[in-house]
Amino acid sequence: MKNNIFIKTTALLSALAMFTVPISPALYAAENILYAYERSSEAEINISGENISVFINGQQLISDAPAVIISDRVFIPLRAVTEAFGASVAWDQSTQMITITYKASTVRLTVGSTQVQLISTGETRAFLFDNAPVLINDRTYVPLRALSEAFGADVKWDGNTRTVNIGISDGVALEIGSRKIVCGETESELLLAFGQPDRQGIGAEGLTWYSYTGDYAAYLSVAVSRGVVCGFITSSPGFRVSNGVIAGQPFSNNGQTVLAGDRRETIQPAVSTAREEYTDIARSYSMSVYRDEFDNSNVWGVRLIMNGYSMPVDTSSSAYCYEQARQISDLTNGFRAVKGLSPLIWESEAADCAFLHSDDMARSNYYGHISPDGRSVAERYIGDAYKAIDENLICTTLESDSIEMVDCWINSSTQRENILSEIYRHTGVGVVCSAANCYITQVFVAHEV
């Protein structure tokens, strides 16, 4: 009976539509309501009454709205499941639209429609579910696969035990000592756990970097964009990333699946000499792992940035170059902490000397320790008397950032010797970027006692 009413009414609306060009919003809405009605009516007819168990992160979901099978597809009660893992759900009766908010993502879907809208990091993306959400006894049900597509959940169906297992884990996490940050958490959560940063500035990828430098044995620089933690850089000893990257240990998974929190994921590498770059398709982040070729290729540093958060940045700006210079100094001290050495103290005279040489190389289009006027770092430095002085240089593309520069020095015997010298007590870094390249100078100074 319902089908006959639907067919007759649709035919009438279609006939009317022939005389209404373009189709009026009211007519369009009426057709959508009828199609939604038809879908939900058919769904109710084909519901399987067999019991289905739902587990979320290993805990069984207890709800008066059980999961069901509709036309051989598993449907789950939306509100009960999403609220169980901490999402908020809003329902608009007039449009039958459901809005789900979880961390930095919002999903909008409508009963009877396969169209879905995902809003994340300020960007909106539309996609389709295989099956439309339906109303059953005034409860909204969505296809099981919907959670996976909308929130990146790890969803599994066991037909033998008739069990749904849903894994909703946090984003990739970094642990340093007893403290942990999770990509995707809010800026407020970061500040609550770590406090105010010792320094913040605009750096790589146009992101705001919060640097914690009070103890270089726990050095960390965290990327924040739009109020969300979206990446990190560290060279501190003992750091652990939830995808298996651990300081001081080898890491080269060659695309194999690794454990990450409560789920497993695959990261695909593109290998360089001392660095491995990975893009995790499931979690949409890019990660670079930096290895020490002088220490059995063990990991000394890591940089991870979530895709979709990068912002335009003027690499020639003084603010950007200064942040890069300070991060180079921080990463140097983090690496020295790994080797049991005391941190180098930032010195303005050494930084000025380094900056002026980088600027001279950029302006005069040369690269070398001896400037065109014949001066070396010993003659360019104008600070207090010293007993030893040296410098590291590098010229890179605009795409390179602080940790890549330090990685090159760590894996070069001469520059590494300066970084790990017990003689030097002070340092300063100067970064200047031209239209095509960045010139970096790090000066090391040992003053007379």
Image (tube, rainbow, N blue to C red):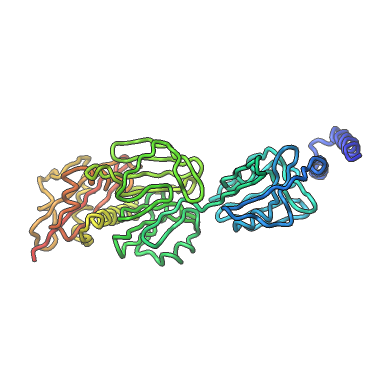
Of 177 and 200, which appears nearest the observer?
A: 177
Residue 191, relative to residue 68: is it above or below? Answer: below
Residue at position x 32%, y 51% in the image: 247
Residue 89 visible, this angle: yes
**Image quadrant where residue 41 sits:** top right
Question: Outermost residue toward the front?
Answer: 160
Of 199 and 3, which appears nearest the observer?
A: 3
Residue at position x 25%, y 57% in the image: 337
Looking at the image, residue 234 sits to the left or right of residue 381; the answer is right
Q: Residue 415, percent across and down?
A: 18, 46
Q: Residue 98, percent across and down?
A: 70, 52
Tell me the quadrant of the picture where the C terminus can be found.
bottom left
Residue 445, relative to residue 256: is it above or below? Answer: below
Looking at the image, residue 110 sits to the left or right of residue 364; the answer is right
Residue at position x 19%, y 47% in the image: 416
Looking at the image, residue 315 sits to the left or right of residue 140; the answer is left
Of 165 and 207, which appears nearest the observer?
A: 165
Residue 314 visible, this angle: no
**Image quadrant where residue 274 sits:** top left
Residue at position x 57%, y 47% in the image: 153
Tell me the quadrant of the picture where the N terminus can be found.
top right
Q: Residue 432, percent across and down?
A: 28, 48
**Tally of numbered discs:** 0
Q: Residue 372, percent across and down?
A: 13, 43
Looking at the image, residue 161 sits to the left or right of residue 292; the answer is right
